[in-house]
Each structure stands twice: as C-alpha cells, then as structure tokens.
Amino acid sequence: MSAIDLLDVRKVYRDRDGQDLVALERTRLSLAAGEFLCLLGPSGCGKSTLLNLVAGFEAPSSGEIRVAGRRVERPGADRGVVFQQPTLMPWLTVIDNVAFHLTLKGVGRAERRERAQAYLDLVGLRGFERHYPAELSGGMSQRVGIARALLMNPAVILMDEPFAALDAQTKSEMQEELVAIWERVGATVIFVTHSVDEALVLGTRVAVMSRRPGRIREVLPFDAPRPRDVTSPAFNDVKRHVLGLIRAESARPPRAA
Ligand SMILES: Nc1ncnc2c1ncn2[C@@H]1O[C@H](COP(=O)(O)OP(=O)(O)O)[C@@H](O)[C@H]1O
Ligand SMILES: [Mg+2]
C-alpha cells in the first residue's frame, strides 16, 4: 500500500470576481512509505494547494486523496505540517510551542515537557526551551516549527518552502539536519521548493508540475549517494533536465481555466 495517493485530484477556487480558477487538474501521484518527494514548479502552479489538500486543510473539488489507504477528510496527527513562516505562538515559550498539540490533547505538563524536550534536542535547540519566539533567529524559529511537526511522530511530513526565508549558510545546515532527521524517523515527506538545487540535495524523487492549472508533468527518481555532491556530473545532468522542464513550463502561455 502506498503512503500517499492523489487520485485524479482537481481543485477549483472561486476568485474575487466570482470566476472559477482551476488550481489543480487531474493530478495523480503516489508515494511509497519513506520516500522524500520534492515538488517543483512555476509560481502559482498549485504546489501549496496540493500540500494543503494532503494536509486536509482543504478538500479537493473532485478526485480523492488517501494517506495510508484512508481518505483524507480533515487534518490529522498522522500528518505534520511545516510552513514557510513557522507560525509560532508568541506568548508561549519554545518548549510550550513544540508541545502545543499535546496541550490540546490534555497531556499533563511533565509528560509534555519530556516529550517536547526530545524533539528540541533532535533539532539542536537544547538550551532554548524557555526562550520566546521573538528572541529567536529565523533558522531557530523554523527548527521549532519542525520539532512541533515531528512531535506527534507523524507518518507523513508536509513542508511548504520551509527554508525559503533563510540565509544560504543556515539553509544548508537545516537541509543536512532535515535529511538526518528523515533518515532517523523514516517518515514520508513531501517538500515544496522553488529551488532545483534544494530539491536535488533532499529528494529521493523530484516531481515537476506544469504551469497552472497544475498537473504533475514529470517525476524523476534521484538516488545519488548522500550527502549529495552538487558539483557531480550526475547531479548536474538531472539539474539541467529539471531546469529545462521548469523553463518550458514558465514560458508556456497559461491555459484557459
Ligand atoms: N484560497 C484561494 N482562493 C482563491 N485562489 C487561490 C487560493 N489559494 C490559491 N489560489 C490560487 O490557486 C493557484 C495556485 O496557488 P498555490 O497553490 O498557492 O501555488 P504555488 O504554491 O505553486 O505558488 C494560484 O493562482 C492562486 O492564486
Ligand atoms: Mg506556494
């Protein structure tokens, strides 16, 4: 059984003028458990839409999404989500932000702290438990968001350009750390990015979407050894191919909805 299936998913939004806007069209995709799929495509092609549908924040207009064989109808603890902005609660300390879902579930304070501490250690934030979000750098805030998403031990991790706002050095540290965490927890990941390099540093497969209305245009396996050597011929062959696909999509006139 696959970990995630998108079966002919279509998503239509109503725009401000009352016109239908087709964000996703006949989108088919299956992920095996433990895969790390990076999703690339021109801006506005429906990457966030796809992620939000798998997360259960929105419902498809037609088609179906399944996680571990079960139809997605709402958000669930089986799916951890990390956004571009970490959406921390400014009035809670780092450890209470990480433990937030446990608080909602009524787990007692001592157990909450113990479980949150383990994930803070995992993302390298030991010593910052009592800090508030305003006292953190962008990279540290993003780590808190990742720890919060991992805490429920989700089978699926959904990440929407989580490192886009970080400086180059922090970004590459976070990428390394994410790969180490993924290898350790064995989750299935969908990671949205607009960076081909990032996709090829992280992914076991790279999916390129077409311009809106988005579909999966091509899915490429990439099994180069880790840590990935961005100067290797294998890396650059795939990069050239993916860049070509994205350029072709960006240059194409939009199809009528
Ligand atoms: N809630 C919404 N209401 C109306 N249109 C939306 C909504 N969310 C996204 N869209 C539109 O759907 C298309 C795909 O958006 P999105 O999934 O955010 O693209 P991406 O993440 O690939 O940049 C865009 O044209 C966007 O304007
Ligand atoms: Mg987006």
Image (spheres, helix red, strand yellow):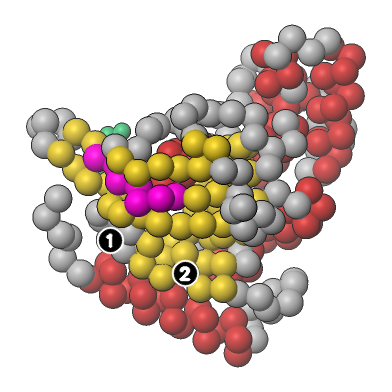
The residue lying toward the viewer, choosing from 123 and 182, is: 182
Q: Amino acid at mark 1?
A: Arg
Identify the image quadrant of residue 245.
bottom left
Question: Label 2 CB, ligand 1: below 8 Å?
Answer: no
Res 98 → quadrant? top right
Disc 2 crowd, CA 10 A, few/some/many (<14, 14-19, 20+): some
Mark number for residue 178?
Answer: none
**Residue pictured at 11% horizontal, 31% vertical:** 18
Q: Give the alpha-carbon distance from disc 1 to disc 2, as whole Å.
A: 15 Å
Query: Which residue lies under the disc numbered 1?
Result: 211
Helix, strand or loop at label 1? It is loop
Whether residue 207 is visible to the viewer of this picture, yes or no, is yes
For ligand 1, tell me if the residue under mark 1 lies within 8 Å: no
The region drawn magenta spans 6-12
Residue 145 relative to residue 102: left or right: left
Please tell me which residue is depicted at 44% across the width and 61% down the height of the picture.
40
Q: Position of residue 228 (x, y in %)?
A: 69, 74
The residue that appears at 79% across and 13% down in the rendered structure is 107
State which tag comes first along the sequence, 1 or 2. Answer: 1
Closer to the camera: disc 1 or disc 2?
2
Identify residue for label 2. 219
